[in-house]
Amino acid sequence: MMFYGTIILLAWSLFKHTTSKWLITILAVLMIGLTGYSRIFVRVHYPTDVFAGFSLGFALLMLSWWFFSPYLSRQHQRKQKADR
């Protein structure tokens, strides 16, 4: 959840084309879902374990995004100014 969630958030903040944003989002969400499903399918974890992992991963993702978003927005603004 943390890895693919970070890829989604970075794609939405850095890419210009909406199509590429949605493509990356769909692929990353599929990977998150399939990873959780595979853990249940091979009977390594219970569904509650997977749900708890998703919840914890999402909470940590939002916390880290809140912490790093000012830095990323400044970098993005500098890049836009340099492109002009």
Image (spheres, grey):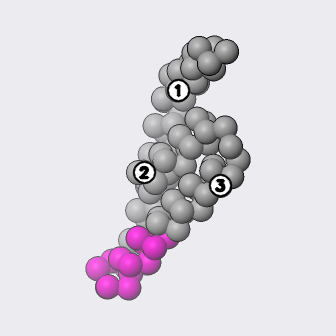
- Residue contact at pointers 3 and 2, CB within 8 angstroms: no
- Identify the residue at image location x=63%, y=14%: 81
Q: Residues within 10 Å of mark 1 (few under 14, many from 20)?
A: some
Dot 1: what SS? Answer: helix
Q: Main secondary structure of the magenta part?
A: helix
Snapshot quadrant of residue 40: bottom left
**Residue drawn at (61%, 39%) of the image:** 15
Residue 2 numbered tag:
2
Residue 59 in picture, x, y percent from top left: 49, 49
Q: Amino acid at mark 1?
A: Leu
Residue 1, can we see it? yes
User: From what the image shows, is residue 20 above or below residue 50?
Assistant: above
Amino acid found under the numbered disc labelled 2: Met
Front tag of 3 and 2 = 3
Closer to the N terminus: mark 2 or mark 1? Answer: 2
Residue 41 on the magenta segment: yes
Q: Position of residue 8 (x, y in %)?
A: 54, 49
Kindly report the distance in space between the C-alpha atoms of the residues bearing marks 3 and 2. 18 Å
- Per the image, the residue denoted by label 1 is 72
| Mark earlier in primary sequence (3, 2) | 2
| Tag 3–tag 1 contact (CB < 8 Å) | no
Is residue 48 magenta-colored?
Answer: no
**Magenta region:** 33-45
Q: Quadrant of the C terminus?
A: top right
28 or 65: nearer the eye?
28
The residue tagged 3 is: 22
- Residue 38 x, y percent position in the rendering: 38, 78
